[in-house]
């Protein structure tokens, strides 16, 4: 795993995985894809899809715990504050050889710069209007679970978007 390659790929993911529209039906479809993907892998995750501050899909699989909801909240806060996936914010921070707290004054009680929350953007807009978040796996796996589900939903080529390793 190469930091520069991961940063480039995460930027490509965010540029590519944008929606033409996003509504309650989109959230339901995407949330169900995430649940089905986790089940197919035999893993348990908590899932949250929030649009404009409104939760549209929330699901906690058997085997998760209340702590997962707090991880989701902090990762989602990171996406909404920095306008990037929590994974990419973490990679950028790692590249700078610092912590999110030292870099921005963001406390870990409110923000988490690890994989697991991805921005919802409408194609042609730079604005982040929501976030798709999961918790329950290692950060890189949380991130890729989301990327894979969004790519599948948008019929994007996952081979060009997948992280190395």
Image (spheres, helix red, strand yellow):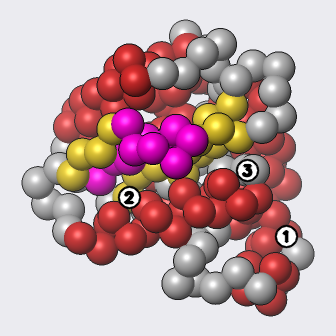
* Quarter of the picture holding the N terminus: bottom right
In which quadrant of the rendered view does residue 106 lie? bottom right
Residue labelled with disc 2: 135
Residue situated furthest left in the rendering: 62
Name the quadrant containing residue 2. Answer: bottom right
Q: Is residue 89 visible?
A: yes
Residue 96 position, x and y percent, is 88, 75
Q: Quadrant of residue 63?
A: bottom left
Name the residue rendered at 83%, 34% in the picture: 126
SS at mark 2? strand
Of marks 3 and 1, which one's residue comes earlier in the chain? 3
Q: In the rendered image of this protein, does residue 156 appear above or below residue 2?
A: above
For image coordinates 71% across by 60% down, the residue present is 81
Residue 30 counted in the magenta span: no
Compared to residue 143, the image places residue 111 above or below, namely below
How many angstroms separate mark 2 from mark 3 (CA)? 17 Å
- Name the residue that disc number 1 marks: 95
Instruction: For marks 3 and 1, give the one nearer the viewer.
Output: 3
**Residue 50 is inside the magenta segment:** yes
- Please tell me whether mark 1 or mark 2 is closer to you in this view: 2
* Mark linked to residue 130: none
Residue 102 in the figure: left or right of residue 37: right
The residue drawn where x is 52% and y is 38% is 51
CA gap, disc 1 and disc 2:
24 Å
In the drawing, does residue 66 fall left or right of residue 19? left
Secondary element type, mark 1:
helix
Secondary structure beneath dot 3 equals loop
Judge by depth and name the residue closer to the eye, 83 or 36. 83
User: Which range of residues does the magenta coloring cover?
Assistant: 46-56
Label 1, residues with CA under 10 Å away: few <14, some 14-19, many ≥20: few
| Placement of 134 over or under 107, stated as above or below | above
């Amino acid at each position: 795993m190469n930091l520069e390659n991961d940063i480039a790929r995460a930027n490509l993911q965010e540029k590519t995985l944008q929606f033409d529209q996003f509504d309650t039906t989109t959230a339901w479809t995407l949330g169900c894809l995430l649940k089905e993907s986790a089940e197919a892998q035999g893993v348990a995750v908590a899932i949250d899809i929030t649009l404009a501050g409104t939760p549209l899909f929330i699901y906690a699989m058997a085997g998760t715990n209340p702590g997962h909801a707090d991880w989701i909240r902090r990762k989602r806060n990171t996406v909404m504050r920095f306008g990037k996936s929590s994974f990419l914010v973490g990679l950028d921070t790692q590249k700078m050889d610092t912590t999110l707290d030292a870099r921005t004054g963001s406390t870990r009680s409110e923000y988490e710069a690890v994989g697991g929350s991805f921005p919802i953007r409408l194609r042609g807009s730079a604005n982040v209007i929501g976030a798709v978040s999961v918790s329950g796996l290692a950060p890189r796996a949380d991130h890729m679970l989301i990327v894979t589900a969004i790519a599948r939903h948008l019929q994007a080529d996952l081979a060009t978007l997948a992280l190395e390793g």
